Image (cartoon, helix red, strand yellow):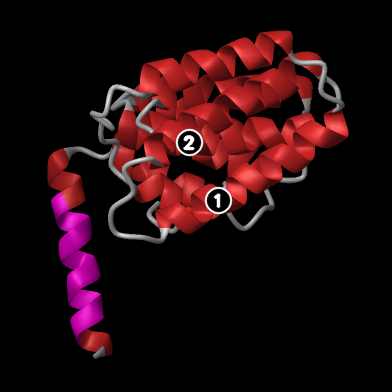
Amino acid sequence: MKRIIWMGVTAAVVLWSVNACGDGSTAKETSTEQQEQSNGVQRKEDRQAEIMQMEQEIGRLANKDKNPTLDRKAEILLLRYRDYITVNPRDSMTAEYLFKAADLSLGVNKPKASIAYLDRLIQDFPDFRKGPEMMLFRGFIYEAHLNQHAEAVKAYEAMIKRYPNHRLAEDAKASIANLTMSEEELIEKFKQQNAAGEKAS
């Protein structure tokens, strides 16, 4: 399974490498953000508007070559997601923010945090409209980012069980097959695929 469609804040966010700002301001600014969060009396509509503005700003920054403030802003946005989720645990936007927080966490190299968001999403919002993508994403994180193949197989199997007729179920099956094949079987499979590709061309 290498045909994955993630629907997070922006595709570019998942691809960036995390770099320290190095200007000494990050800790102070993050502390200020945390203090504002704990003191906040912001209406949920205002928080949603703020989050949307931050998402757009991060999207613009992620499209540039060098963005020394990108990581800091991503961490602040994660705080905003967590704040909203905590204050509004059953709100319809909470499911969206859990999914986005999972995606963004992976973008800042926090795969375990990403899994935690996805687990909560599965538990609290079983009918979430992006359920198949969410469950496939979970397996992908275990497979490619945590190197926990047994957990990846379980995640893919859970996705297939819940969404047996979904188009992404085939991706999950292919991933399970790859993870459970021996090294020799994988080599033979790739040889057959290459041979078939050469005949087609």
Q: Which mark is residue 73?
A: 2
Residue drawn 12% across the image and 45% down it: 184
Residue 148 drawn above or below residue 165: above
The secondary structure type at the circle numbered 2 is helix
Depth check, front residue: 101 or 130:
101
Q: In which quarter of the image is residue 88?
A: top right
Regarding residue 142, the answer to whether it shows in the image is yes
Find residue 43 and report its horizontal and vertical position in percent. 87, 26
Q: Report the Cα–Cα distance between label 2 and label 1.
A: 9 Å
Residue drawn 51% across the image and 40% down it: 137
Identify residue type, mark 1.
Answer: Glu
Left or right of 48? Residue 132 is left
Find residue 56 and report its horizontal and vertical position in percent. 60, 53
Q: Looking at the rendering, in which quadrant would you find the C terminus?
A: bottom left
Sooner in the amino-acid sequence: mark 2 or mark 1: 1
Q: Can you identify the residue that label 1 sits on? A: 57
Q: Quadrant of residue 23?
A: top left
Q: How crowded is mark 1: few (under 14 residues within 10 Å), some or many (20 or more)?
A: some
Identify residue type, mark 2.
Answer: Lys
Magenta segment: 187-198
Residue 138 drawn above or below residue 16: above
Residue drawn 38% across the image and 40% down it: 69
Q: Which mark is residue 187?
A: none
Residue drawn 35% across the image and 33% down it: 143
Residue contact at pointers 2 and 1, CB within 8 angstroms: yes
Left or right of 35? Residue 110 is left
Left or right of 42? Residue 135 is left
Depth check, front residue: 55 or 136:
55
Q: Assess whether residue 107 is covered by the magenta stretch.
A: no
The secondary structure type at the circle numbered 1 is helix
Find residue 85 and report its horizontal and vertical position in percent. 73, 21
Regarding residue 163, the answer to whether it shows in the image is no
